[in-house]
Image (cartoon, rainbow, N blue to C red):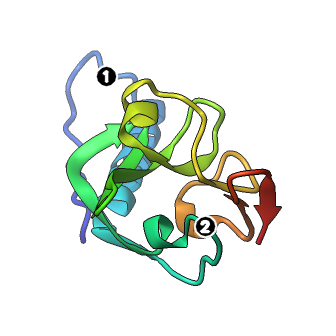
Amino acid sequence: WSVVIQILDYTGLPGQRWVAQTLRWLVRVAEMSAVANVTISGVAGPNSHILNGTYVRMGGTLYNGKPIFKQTTQEGDYFLRYTPDALWVVSGKSEMEGNENEGILRSADRDLRSASDALAWHVWNNTMWEKK
């Protein structure tokens, strides 16, 4: 990907501050646009058949300011998404549509730029969360 910035000298622009904010925004959009798929592997336990697999980016859609990814399984659609609580989670369609914080996989850390930045994950084993 590449970012092209054309600075035009129009009266009324707030100057350097505007240019810096625009640059940060363009770089952020370009970074988010670069990821097309996310593959989750190595999950064991009762939900592994749902969690392991490739999640495909849903076009240019942003969800809570981050890209959202979808995997279709025999049990339905599952989404890797960013929650209002600033966690990356994998959840079903109803949790995604309700913008809920629940899921069956969640990042251990908050405020991560992307799901790939997570160093640890919690997996729901149908009874409790297990740190992986």
| Residue closest to the eye, 129 or 28 | 129
The residue positioned 46% from the left and 27% from the top of the image is: 99
Q: Residues within 10 Å of mark 2 (few under 14, many from 20)?
A: few
Query: Residue at label 1?
Result: 13
Residue 111 x, y percent position in the rendering: 67, 46
Residue 23 x, y percent position in the rendering: 39, 48
Tell me the number on the disc at residue 104.
none
- For the C terminus, the image quarter is bottom right
Residue 65 x, y percent position in the rendering: 43, 37
Q: Point out the frontmost of discs 1 and 2.
A: 2
The residue positioned 46% from the left and 33% from the top of the image is: 95
User: Which amino acid, by three-letter code, is at mark 1?
Assistant: Leu
- For residue 86, which quarter of the picture? top right
Residue 64 in sight in this render: no
- For residue 85, which quarter of the picture? top right
User: Which amino acid, by three-letter code, is at mark 2?
Assistant: Pro
Q: CA distance from mark 1 to mark 2?
A: 56 Å
The residue positioned 29% from the left and 63% from the top of the image is: 74
The residue positioned 23% from the left and 19% from the top of the image is: 11
Tell me the number on the disc at residue 46.
2
Residue 40 in sight in this render: yes
- For residue 44, which quarter of the picture? bottom right
Q: Helix, strand, or loop for circle 1?
A: loop
**So how many labels did they put on this image?**
2
Residue 28 x, y percent position in the rendering: 41, 52
Q: Helix, strand, or loop for circle 2?
A: loop
